Image: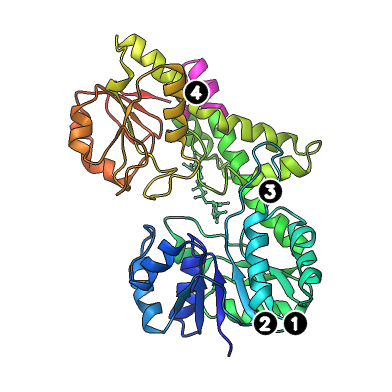
Amino acid sequence: MNSICVTGLGRIGLPTALTLASRGLPVVGSDSNPSIIEALQKGVVTFEEKGMDALLKAAIREGIKFGAKPAATDFYIVAVPTPYDKGTKKIDPSYVVNAVRDILRVCLPNPIIVIESTVSPGTIDRYLRPLTSETGVKARFAHAPERVIPGRMLYELEHNARVIGADSRETAELIRSVYATFCLGGFAFTDIRSAEMAKIVENTFRDINISFANELAKICRADGMDVYEIIRMANMHPRVNILQPGPGVGGHCISVDPWFLVGDYPLEARLIHEARKINDSMPMYVLERVREIMAENNISDTSRVGFYGISYKEDVDDVRESPTLQLMDLVKTCMGNPPKVFDPMLCERVTPSQYMDFNEFIRDVDFVVIMVGHSHLAGHQREMNDKIVLDTRNVYHREGAYRL
Ligand code: SAJ
């Protein structure tokens, strides 16, 4: 069997490449970032995720190779980022286009190119198929969007069902035979455009549901009701399942993908657009709460305020679209001195006023804003007993603490 080349060794490509290799398949992983390749060649994982260390070791034992360029083969999986253009709200396909261009330069004849990156409906037809006429290489494109949730990636990689969008059943079956080496969750076959749409719809569904919880939080705050208790009770109904409000929706998926629909279908995607606006308003909403609480407690210096948690959600080290970093920018613009900030998941500084030690952080602030409900917090609530606390995640249960 020719090797499988996984292009883009980020948070999706790397676990996919390692999982395939650990099942004994010949795998080459490529990434244009030399520091990623260097780390992997030394056996060092590039981000925190449960089980990744052991998986990398297993893949290396099975002979996985890493390189800067895609390998010459006939089966590719592409997992590069797909940001959106903040002006037009449309997908920025440049990474995926460049990745496919690089592949078409070196591939064997008639390759299968599976796009795992999330793309807006029609992207493969519009931006990738034309590349084959530029190069004269006939490629069989397909879309098998990733669905794994950070924090449970390796479990979900194995257990979630997978959608495969392809031009023919024969191509889809070939792709299934590769993924079936580790995927126990079952497969659905469809055309490429429907697979593109299904993935975007999944993340949009979650975004809208979070925006509902966030809007409820605002309504309840306006009239002195306990949003968490109301959601808890409403969720006792067999057909109600409301998500949790929070300080904003971060990460590179849920806060990005719905924009593709807003950008491409501006007249139709009204609810989706409104949900995005509600979720994006949450850091500002938290800022208003911070201001009120500071005034109530006679605190005027924002450098005595500390934000606990920088990552976009609990127990991950990913700070992309972080609500905390958005809030930090707002404080700097609207109020002055940067607040202090700490995150137990981060080993590197991402912002100058960041502390690397929890006790020092707590010592230097009077008012703690819990932005992320990391598991670390469960063992450190006592240290905050004499602080003013605003808990935006409903994880700190001391009498007198402020809530969202
Ligand atoms: N959040 C809330 N309230 C909630 C749930 C989440 O405020 O009740 C916030 C989180 O704190 C975070 C953001 O939303 O800031 C997104 O977190 P998440 O856990 O909902 O999702 P992601 O972005 O980590 O992963 C999602 C998943 N999609 C769905 O569940 C539909 C995952 O399965 C996808 O593979 C991933 O996007 C992706 O890569 O597309």
Please name the residue shown 47% across and 67% down the image. Answer: 14
The answer to whether marks 2 and 1 mark residues whose Cβ atoms lie closer than 8 Å is yes
Looking at the image, tell me whether mark 4 or mark 3 is earlier in sequence order: 3
Main secondary structure along the magenta-highlighted residues: helix
Looking at the image, tell me whether mark 1 or mark 4 is earlier in sequence order: 1
Q: Nearer the viewer, mark 4 or mark 3?
A: 3
Q: Is mark 3 within 8 Å of ligand 1?
A: no
Q: CA distance from mark 3 to mark 1?
A: 30 Å
The residue nearer to you, when weighing 341 against 154, is: 341
In the picture of the structure, the residue carrying the numbered disc 1 is: 170
Residue 24: image x %, image y %?
Answer: 46, 85
Q: Which residues are magenta?
A: 215-227
- The amino acid marked with disc number 4 is Tyr
Give SS at disc 3.
loop
Residue 91 disc label: 3
Give SS at disc 1.
helix
Residue 128: image x %, image y %?
Answer: 74, 63
In the picture of the structure, the residue carrying the numbered disc 2 is: 174
Q: Dot 3: few (<14), some (14–19), or many (≥20) neighbours within 10 Å?
A: many
For residue 274: magenta? no
Residue 166: image x %, image y %?
Answer: 74, 71
Q: Quadrant of residue 56?
A: bottom left
The residue nearer to you, when weighing 174 against 100, is: 100
The answer to whether marks 4 and 3 mark residues whose Cβ atoms lie closer than 8 Å is no
Give SS at disc 2.
helix
Q: Tell me if residue 194 comes above or below residue 244 in the rendering.
A: below
Q: CA distance from mark 2 to mark 1?
A: 6 Å
Q: Tell me if residue 54 comes above or below residue 357 in the rendering.
A: below
Residue 285 disc label: 4
Q: Tell me if residue 294 comes above or below residue 83 in the rendering.
A: above
The residue nearer to you, when weighing 165 against 59, is: 59
